[in-house]
Amino acid sequence: MEKTREFDIGYIIEVSGERALVELRADTTKPLGEDYYPGQPGSYVKIPFRDFQIIGTVTSVRMETSNAVSSGAGRKVAECILLGTLEHDERFFRGVAVYPNVGQTVQMVSSRELNKIFSEFSEFGFSFGRPTSARDQRVYVQVNRFFGGHIAVLGTTGSGKSYTVVSILQQTIRKYPNPHIVVLDLHGEYARAFPEGVNLINANNIDLPYWVLNFEEFVDLTVDMNEPTAKNQITVIRDSLLRARQAWDTRERLGLGEQITADSPVYYELDELIAMLRDWNIQMVYNGLGEQEEGPLYGVFDKFLIRMDSRLSDPRYHFMFKPRVYDASPKFSDLLRDYLSIDAPHRMTVIDLSGLPSDAVGVVVAVITRIAFEFNLWNPQRERCPILLVLEEAHNYVPNHADGRFTAARSAVERLAKEGRKYGIGLILVSQRPKELSETVLSQCNTFITMRLTNPADQDYVRRLVPDSLAGLLNMLPALRTGEALILGDSVAMPTRMMVDLPDPQPGTGDIQFARWWQNGVDSLNLEQVIKRWRTRRQDL
């Protein structure tokens, strides 16, 4: 085999842990080989050492004009992070086998060596982008670690987050015939990207009935925790929910008996539950003198009942309080097939949440997340039925600080993040404000796909979540192009700056062309259609 020409670019002047400083001797303004500029941030270097090639990446470069330790002023110094080792010029592995010494030669990495590195997981055949500094290569991921270890896709608005997620999902459904994927789409962006092979549940035909809610989710939706009587309401609701489910267990002859809890997914009539609470709310009791007086719960549910009456008459909540399809306990299996893509002709379900009221979004997220978790919790064949859950704009309903809102959603997602791996459930968390997203959830992610982040607080927050040795790589986040990402984690051969493949078809996102349409105008805008859709909150009219 023809030996690749070696290009020396400098030598090591300092080694500290996984960080090395390299004094560059090559001309940094001229390329070596085809397109390799020595010392360019994001480029790769190698340090030959016996039979090993220690691989690193440049994170920064500077010109030292004073206080130089050696070789006089005006030297160029590149800071590198040591990422892994190419052993015997064949196999790449993460970590440094032997640390280099001061004075050792530093060389450019050849295309053949990069191919060895980036093809580490090529047997999986799963890739959705190319290294920025090696456009003739592909970045392959280890699929089991990638989807099984949770993924965070982070970046400011317009950086290409949705394109990245769509590219990943399109690659998944094209490669694998039997995936189980659920996408919670907060802005209705994904439908256009998946015209075939998926179950699209838009805001107009969501049917997620109230009786599927567990106790915590029901309370989160119906009880105002700021009310002085909230604790009393919660206690009575728990007992009333249990009684209502037990009554319908008998009517539907499910045979569950005492095994039913307030959380069991058993149908009950909401009107009967509310009637039970109304009775408690106006109950009169006799005192020791034989006179009637207000019972211990008299008036406790006044505001609760007003709020429930308002919700029941609000068309925006019909998807939950007036179920059309899943209106009995035996229909629960149909709901699982439809929403989790279980034993169904489609391989992915996209749930459009854009038309739901904001206070209902958190409950829907909580229910879907919990259902996915509990399905595989009780599924004896969970190893053969892994599920991927995609949460768009997750910071909106999984906040970093508990403030009384989205309690159920935060609890459900955090539980899944901590325990989901054991039950074959993976997460893709998408957020433009990582600082506002639950640290508990983010800290459980093993793969970070970090796109352009310009907010210093968000950058610092992400730095705390990655190993200290890789924090220097995040300095390039503000300069990333649209569609460019820094991918970190054990699902890739090494931390890599990559260009994500453009999805086809593309999601319904992108920059609005102000100049074009302000110049050309709109020939015929159907205002009546806009108003009708607005009034009815229906996107399909």
Image: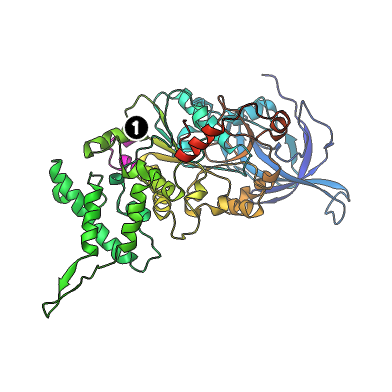
Q: Which residue is mark 1?
A: 338
Residue 438 or 494: which is nearer the viewer?
438
Q: Residue 203: which quarter of the image?
A: top left
* Residue most extreme to the left: 290
Residue type at mark 1 is Asp
User: Looking at the image, is 86 positioned above or below residue 404?
Assistant: above
Residue 273 or 36: which is nearer the viewer?
273
Residue 144 visible: yes
Residue 376 picture location, percent across and down: 32, 40
Secondary structure beneath dot 1 equals helix
> Along the horizontal axis of the image, is 332 left or right of 85?
left
Point 68% across, 33% down: residue? 513
* Residue most extreme to the top: 1
Residue 376 lies in the magenta stretch = yes
Residue 388 lies in the magenta stretch = no
Point 20% across, 49% down: residue? 245
User: Looking at the image, is 17 positioned above or below residue 288?
Assistant: above
Residue 336 picture location, percent across and down: 31, 35
Q: How is the image coloured?
A: rainbow
Residue 263 picture location, percent across and down: 27, 50
Q: Main secondary structure of the magenta part?
A: helix
For the record, the magenta segment spans 371-382
Residue 527 or 79: which is nearer the viewer?
527
The N terminus: image quadrant: top right
